[in-house]
């Protein structure tokens, strides 16, 4: 496999430090529902994990739950998003966190995203975060202000290595902009003090005073707690590169002298009407939004696979409808193959060529659009039904479209009733009324046909 590493800004051949592959993904801040743009990150991470497994790697996957410390402004300004969410709904922070965590887990399951081996909540790793801050402090990378303990980015020569074109002189820009007590605008909070005027719902004792951790320290501490000082892959959205992931790396280097992840991989934005989808807009689309419009969650998963993860994905209901039609055609074809295929006895060269082309596409930095093109070439090929079916089921381990579980849908009772009435009219040779019922059945999305054993109902797209 060759994967694009944001550190080197190039594709690199991937080989793990050891088995299993250790993979960490930045998870949700559970102060609100996840929107479709957020969920693209987890479809991407899941696709990466499935691809690694496809090529024989064992994988241990960790996703964190940020339930404290993520401020409304990534530059350490504003209030904690969790506290803001609790005030918005007049609930406790803990209730907000658990409610939106469960909503997120439901979305993940609906999208057929494999459950990680561990969900790590930031509030359950406070001790590990404090210990890491203490090590960073002992190594001389911190200073204290009236509102917290800050990381001094001017002390780390490697700071900004993840940012293309980063200029170290930018570290002194704080002298020309309003940054409060920060020495440079790139400095960031490791620990924030609770305000003496207002008691927080989430706060802890620390060597520096009562408060709560900064957003960035959470992931570094949890990743290292789960995997050790260095692990294989860290994923997230491209918006994490300039601040969150850059600061994660700085903390790890200040603590151990090492970058804690070897491969940094990021998916691009989902864009809606020309702009990045964001919770702050207040009218964002969530998974339930498209379900309410009649889409299946796997329509969105398929939609994501049609664009390479490192390219912006432009959302529209028209594009999602096209993805739904293609996914339904694929699913219905698999159902037909299941019903018609016989066991195959040979391994034709054509099958091996298709296997190689599909594998090469996935191995080339997760080129799912090309891989899906191979899928449809297989369907129109001269391979036997048995070979077509076995390839599609094997490849679905990577695609995650639940093709192996696909079954022909049973017509609803009201459609069956119409078909029976039509059958009766045909027997009476009232073909005009029978044809009218056929059209009515079609309007419900079903096609009725006749056989020696009676009528047959199939979905319109079957």
Image (cartoon, rainbow, N blue to C red):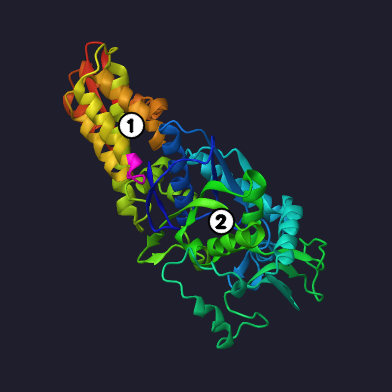
Camera sees residue 326: no
Q: Position of residue 42 (x, y in %)?
A: 49, 48
Is residue 105 at all visible to an observer of this figure?
A: yes
- Tally of numbered tags: 2
Image quadrant in which you'd find residue 313? bottom left
The residue singled out by tag 1 in the image is 331
Q: Which residue is mark 2?
A: 259
**Badge 1 element:** helix
The residue depicted at 72 percent of the width and 69 percent of the height is 192
Q: Is residue 363 magenta?
A: yes
Tell me if mark 1 has few (under 14), some (14-19) or many (20+) residues whose alpha carbon lies within 10 angstroms of its own: many
Q: Is residue 211 above or below residue 306?
A: below
Q: Is residue 158 above or below residue 98?
A: below
Image quadrant in which the C terminus is located: top left
Residue 119 in the image, given as x and y percentages of width and height: 63, 44
Q: Quadrant of the N terminus?
A: top left
- Which residue is depicted at the point 62% across and 44% down? 227
Tell me residue 292's x, y (percent). Answer: 45, 48
Mark 1 or mark 2: which is in front? Answer: 2
* Front in this rendered view, residue 188 or 371: 188
The picture places residue 305, in percent across and down from the top left corner, at: 36, 45
Q: Main secondary structure of the magenta part?
A: loop
Distance from Cα at disc 1 to Cα at disc 2: 43 Å
The one nearer the camera, 108 or 167, is: 167
| Magenta region | 362-367
- The disc, 1 or 2, on the residue closer to the chain's N-terminal end is 2
């Amino acid at each position: 496999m060759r994967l694009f590493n944001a550190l080197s800004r190039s594709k690199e051949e991937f080989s793990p430090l050891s088995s299993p592959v250790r993979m960490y993904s930045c998870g949700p801040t559970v102060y609100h529902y996840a929107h479709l743009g957020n969920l693209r990150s987890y479809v991407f991470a899941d696709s990466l994990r499935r691809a690694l497994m496809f090529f024989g790697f064992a994988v241990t996957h960790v996703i964190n739950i940020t339930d404290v410390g993520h401020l409304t402004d990534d530059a350490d300004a504003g209030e904690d998003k969790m506290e803001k969410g609790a005030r918005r709904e007049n609930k406790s922070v803990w209730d907000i966190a658990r409610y939106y965590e469960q909503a997120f887990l439901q979305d993940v399951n609906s999208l057929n995203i494999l459950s990680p081996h561990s969900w790590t909540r930031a509030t359950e790793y406070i001790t590990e975060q404090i210990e890491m801050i203490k090590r960073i402090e002992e190594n001389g990378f911190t200073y204290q202000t009236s509102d917290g303990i800050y990381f001094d980015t001017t002390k780390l020569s490697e700071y900004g290595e993840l940012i293309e074109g980063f200029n170290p002189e930018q570290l002194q820009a704080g002298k020309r902009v309003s940054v409060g007590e920060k020495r440079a605008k790139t400095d960031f909070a490791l620990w924030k003090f609770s305000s003496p005027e207002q008691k927080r719902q989430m706060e802890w004792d620390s060597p520096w005073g009562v408060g709560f951790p900064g957003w960035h320290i959470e992931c570094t501490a949890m990743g290292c707690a789960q995997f050790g000082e260095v692990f294989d892959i860290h994923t997230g959205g491209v918006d994490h590169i300039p601040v969150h992931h850059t600061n994660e790396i700085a903390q790890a280097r200040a603590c151990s002298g090492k970058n804690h992840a070897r491969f940094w991989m990021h998916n691009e934005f989902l864009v809606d009407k020309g702009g990045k989808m964001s919770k702050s807009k207040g009218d964002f689309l969530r998974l339930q939004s498209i379900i309410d419009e009649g889409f299946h969650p796997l329509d969105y998963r398929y939609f994501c696979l049609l664009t390479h993860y490192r390219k912006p994905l432009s959302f529209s209901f028209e594009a999602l409808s096209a993805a739904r039609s293609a996914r339904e055609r694929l699913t219905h074809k698999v159902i037909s193959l299941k019903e018609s295929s016989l066991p195959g006895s040979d391994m034709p060269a054509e099958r091996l060529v298709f296997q190689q082309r599909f594998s090469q596409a996935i191995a080339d930095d997760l080129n799912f659009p090309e891989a899906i093109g191979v899928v449809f070439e297989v369907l129109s090929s001269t391979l036997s039904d048995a070979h077509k079916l076995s390839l599609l089921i094997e490849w679905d381990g990577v695609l995650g479209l639940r093709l192996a579980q696909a079954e022909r849908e049973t017509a609803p009772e009201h459609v069956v009733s119409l078909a029976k009435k039509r059958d009766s009219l045909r027997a009476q040779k009232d073909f005009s009324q029978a044809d009218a019922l056929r059209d009515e059945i079609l309007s419900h999305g079903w096609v009725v046909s006749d056989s020696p054993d009676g009528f047959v109902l199939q979905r319109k797209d079957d």
